[in-house]
Every structure is written in C-alpha cells, then in structure tokens.
Amino acid sequence: MNDSVRPVFVSTYPPEACGLATFTKDLADAVDLAAGLPVSTVAAIEKISGVDETDARITHVIDNDLPGAYRFAAEAVNDGPGNVVSLQHEFGLYSGAWGSDVLDFMEQCTKPIVTTLHTLLPDPAPLPLRLIRKIASRSRSVVVMTQIAARLLVEVYGVDSHRVKVIPHGVPQVPFGRDGSSKARLGLAGRRVICTFGLINRGKGLEHMVRGMRDVVVACPDALYLIVGTTHPQVRRQEGESYREELQTQAEALGLREHVRFVNRYLDLPDLLSLLQACDVFVTPYPGKDQIASGTIAYAMAIVGAVVSTPYLYAQEVLAGGRGIIVPFSDSSAMAEAAVRLLTDDRLRAKTRWRAYQYVRQMFWPTVGKRYLDLFGQVAVANPARRLSRVGEIIERVAAVPAGE
C-alpha cells in the first residue's frame, strides 16, 4: 500500500470518446492498483462529450472556452490534496496557439509536474519547438513512450536527458493463446479477418488499405477488412460523416461490398478485446511519419499480434526485430502483399505474434502503472511544492501577526 503519492491527472477523461481520455483512465486505474488504494484524481478537460461530474475521481473541470481556465485549474490543484501533477500533452488538447495556454497552468501550479508527451514533431516549426522546450523546463520529468522520442527530445528540442523518462504505452494484460471462440461469437467463422480500429478521420489513410483489399481478395477470397470505430467527434462536428461515406463509396466502386465492413461504434474494453481476438491481421495505414505514440498499435500487438504498418516513428521502434511488417506510406500494393503473407503463412504469423507478445509484456498496465507510481513518488519527495497553497499562505500570514494587533 502506498498512499504517500497522490497524482492529479490533467487531461480529457471518459465519457470523452478519444484515445487520450481512455489512456488517462487506464493509467489512473493502473496507478491506483499499484498503490493499493484510490490515490488518483483528475482535472478533466471538457471537450465534445462533456464531463461526468458525478465521478468521484474528477475534482475539477477545465472549460477551454473560459478565459483564464488554466489559471483557475492551477489554483484548484494548488489547493487540492494532490502532491504531483501528471500532465498529458497533445497539441490539440489545450486552447491557444498550438495549445500554448497550458503554460498558464504550468506557471501558476505549485505542485511538481510530470508531463507525458503523446505527440512530438521531428522537424518542428519555431512555435511548437519553443512550446515543448518551455513545457519541459517547467516539468520535473518528461515521459515519452519510445527511445526514438527520447532522442528527439534531447537532440532536436535540447531537453536535458536527465529529465527524460521512457515508459511504454500501456496495454491490457491478456493471455497469448486464442481458441477461435471470438470469431464464432461475432459471426466471423470462416473469414480471414483484417482490422483497423480507432477514431476515424482523414489522417488515418484508410483509403489505402481499402484499395489494397482488391489484391488481398484475389489471394484470399474469404478475407474481410473491418474498419472499427466512430468518426472523431471534432471531425464529425466540422464535416459530418463525409470521410466514412467516401470510404464506403470507394469499397462499393471496387466491388468490395462483401470484403469491407464498417463497425460504427466506440467500443468499450470488453467488446474491443473480443473483436481484436477475432482478427488475424491488424493494419495501421497512417500516412503521417511523425506519430510517436499509438494506443491502437500497442493494443494490436498484445491481442492480434500480426501487425502491418506504415513506418511512422512509433511503429518503426515497436515493430522492429520481426515483431510486425513495415510497408511504405500510401502504398496499397505493399499493404496488401504484407497482409496476404501473414494471412497465408501460418508459421510467419505465429512467429510474428510470439515476438510481438514477448515485447508487449513490459507494456501490461500493472507494470506501467507501477513505473509511473514510482516516478511520481520520486518527484513528489524530491520536488515539494514551490510555495504554499493560497489557504496555506493565509494561515501563515495570520500566524505571523503579533498577538494584540
């Protein structure tokens, strides 16, 4: 039991339907598990889906449309029971240019801050470069999920290597073996299933794999490509379901009605695990090279095992050593060829799955939660609050007044 560490997470949080909200909840759960009791609280950023204010873990709500929201959040954290802040960072998460309003929070917060970076540009423009440097300078530690990202922080952003910690993205603790029951339960018996999951937007490059399915079906007439997930809420507000509709039209035009299927739901964890256990090959056809973290590929390595991906930064590191197959960006033919190899070569698929599973064992949430808890503990002990909370300041001033005055 460890109740000396009381982290406050600053992030989106469920019911917000986004990967960062899910990550934050999973991490807070894992930290509480490692501590042996509920020690985590959340300052939740309100985006599209709102905040469940009945959730006892949420102690403050941050409204990005409210002027001074991050100064108010810092005051709430300063006056609260937490003794270390876990700041989850994505450029699009916070208000201001490149999310720069997060600095208002960091400048006013008196509790030591550990920042987890989910995005890091290899060749940043001046503003994001300065912003990451400032965030790092105001953080006691900066967490990234790969060695590639750690090198970028040091070599490109000039962050002191002693501040940088590598803790992998967490994944559910699942057994290696599968018995085929998930396929039967989901009505997929007799199909060789390829899948992609996650919030849908144009940056996912799904059209390249849809196009590649023409070649896959020639080699594997029973192949099915599942595109699982809802359209990203912010994308849906701006353009509705136009991208999904374009993908559906593309599949129809290619004669793939029976080979491309859309599961338009944001799945809870049990349903997601069941679906992934029914898949034979997982594909991430992302066209952007700069992504330094991906919960989808981490989950896929743990549960599906046989992964095909474009060479964005995170995939390059986690799929090295035969743990998956890397293909060029936007190359539908290469994606199809890699998927067919894994679908038809049982020995290759088994070897790839085993290597991926051995790698992700270090990423099981109980292990990741313990590593974060240990880091929070080191920071909380070594870096106490810069100054007393507002309540503490008032008490101190009153106590200092001589008797009779």
Image (cartoon, helix red, strand yellow):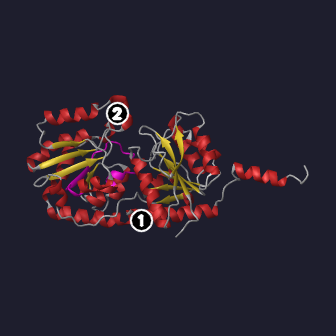
**Image side of residue 195 versus residue 108, left or right:** left
User: In the displayed structure, would residue 355 be above or below residue 122?
Assistant: below
What residue do we see at 18% from left, 62% from top? 348
Is residue 292 or residue 182 the one in the foreground?
A: 182
Q: Which residue is outermost to the right? A: 404
What residue do we see at 22% from left, 35% from top? 247
What residue do we see at 28% from left, 56% from top? 273
Q: Position of residue 289 (x, y in %)?
A: 36, 45
The amino acid at mark 1 is Pro
Query: Which numbered dot is residue 366?
Result: 1
Query: Which numbered dot is residue 236?
Result: 2
Callout 1: few (<14), some (14-19), or many (20+) C-alpha neighbours within 10 Å? many
Local secondary structure at mark 2: helix
User: In the displayed structure, would residue 352 be above or below residue 283?
Assistant: below
**Image side of residue 221 versus residue 305, left or right:** left
**Image side of residue 370 versus residue 298, left or right:** right
Local secondary structure at mark 1: helix
User: What range of the chain is rendered magenta?
Assistant: 277-297
The amino acid at mark 2 is Arg
Q: Position of residue 244 (x, y in %)?
A: 26, 35
